[in-house]
Image: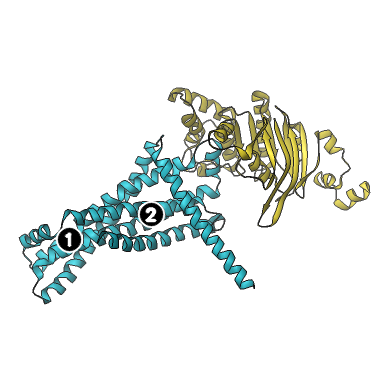
Amino acid sequence: MIKITDLHKSFDGNRVLRGISLEIKKGEVIALIGRSGGGKSVLLKHVSGLMKPDRGSVFIDGKDVATLKGRGLMALRDRLGFLFQGGALFDSMTVYENVAFPLEEKTNWDHERIRERVLLELERVGLSGAEEKYPSQISGGMVKRAALARALVMDPEIMLFDEPTTGLDPIIGHAILNLIHSCHRRFSFTGIIVTHEIPKIFEIVDRVALIHEGVVLIEGTPEEFISSTEPMVKAFLGEPMEEAGGESG
Amino acid sequence: MLGVRKLGEGTLEYVGQMGAMGMFLLRSVLYTLSPPLKFLRVLKQIRFIGFQSMVVILLTGSFSGMVLGFQGYYSLSRFGSDAFLGPMVGLALIKELGPVITALMVTGRAGSAIAAEIGVMRISEQIDALELMGLNPYRYLIVPNLLAGLICLPLLTAVFDVVGIFGGYMIGVKLLGVSGGTYFAEMANYVEMQDVMEGIYKSLSFGVIIVWVSCFKGYFTGIFSGYGAEGVSKATTQAVVLSSVLVLVWDYFMTSLLF
């Protein structure tokens, strides 16, 4: 469904992506892990068409995202949901208005139907009762959950999650991941999750890819990932680099 | 060699920004002329740019008129021409001071707020969120402001002119003793419809300039004006300074053309 081939991107001479290739099948959820500033979020922005690559391509159902314009790009984005790292809720709107916004703008539903759907979505993410609050009046975890409700309200085929648990305490963080997992079981979206939530993330994804120095260093199932002898993988799993290097050597 | 390189880089950046501004205006106008129009957002921005600027326009308009009343009377009475105070105040306000001061006031009050609001939306990824919903940010953020600017600036200028003329009347007639009938009769003799239209054309173009620059600076926060809160701060400052300068420069060209 999503095919990334030899993707390159630089910012002011800093080569962030140096030839990333990755394939994600329909209905599959993959976790992207890697060091901060390693280009994981940049990769998500290429998949969503917010950024254009210097070289290489992202194909979604055979269509090159970078070449899409106008209605073609809009049609692709109608199939996409994106959970931003900071939530990106509209701060001048209440939680209810934020979740209702895509429905009001993209469907012909009447107010009652929209209301039912929004309240259902908010209940699913545990935000019943917070409908009339503004983003500045709720906690970081609630912002993430409201953003998740907004991203899912249009039943997207593809969900992109940019560090959904960053900045949250472990309990809320795990609750968000469980929520993503239950949403995936319900909607069967194809998903990419950028995260540092190791090892919890292994419970909810089909595959894991480690991005290091702008390329995919290793990818595989969570089991394959955990049993890898790659020093960088060991380091991510919490083993010291030197020791890991010694073992692999 | 380093100096030449920096000069070249600076020039390229400047030219690039000018090009981006031109394209931004072109897109904004095209989206304004093509449906659908977000009517409720237009109304909201009319309230923000127009109605909420009324107090400052009433204050500055009345005091500008009163100052003109004093200065005009002082200058004209030297030549025994104080009967022409009405036309002097009227022409100065309608042709020049009304459109320009209104534009500068709206720049300070609404232009800065527009740049800051859109800038914050940019750095907090709210504009990206709009795009990813398959919605066009220009239709939500730029077009309503552009239409509101076009509608509000001439109206605010008209309010400024009327209040200013009345301020001049209060000083010239009530305080300094010019005949009230003369004040308005001479104004009616010397102020022509063409002068009024000149003021309207100016205020329409100032409305476009203010919204164009403010929206552009906010929209490209992080690209042309640094990142984070500092980027928003810079974008807001640049929006106010550039809008004010462009209003005054454009005023000169408009006056030359319409003279």
Residue type pointed to by label 2: Ile
Q: Which residue is mark 2?
A: B210
Q: Quadrant of the N terminus of chain B?
A: bottom right
For label 2, the SS is helix
Foreground pick, B1 / B157: B1
**Left or right side of A32 for A167:** left
Other residues around mark 1 within 10 Å, as few (<14) / some (14–19) / many (≥20):
many
Chain A is which colour? yellow
- Rendering quarter of residue B5: bottom right
Question: With respect to residue A95, does B8 lie above or below?
Answer: below
Q: Mark 1 or mark 2, which has the lower sequence index?
A: 1
- In the rendered image, residue A223, in percent from the top left (x then y), is placed at 84, 33
Residue at 92% x, 46% y: name it: A248
Foreground pick, B110 / B141: B141
**Left or right side of A198 for B217:** left
**Left or right side of A94 for A233:** right
| Chain letter belonging to callout 2 | B
Are the residues flagged by discs 1 and 2 from a single subunit? yes
Q: Which residue is mark 1?
A: B90
- In the rendered image, residue A1, in percent from the top left (x then y), is placed at 70, 30
Question: With respect to residue B32, does B248 lie above or below?
Answer: below
**Left or right side of A32 for A107:** left
Which chain's colour is cyan? B
Q: How many marks?
A: 2
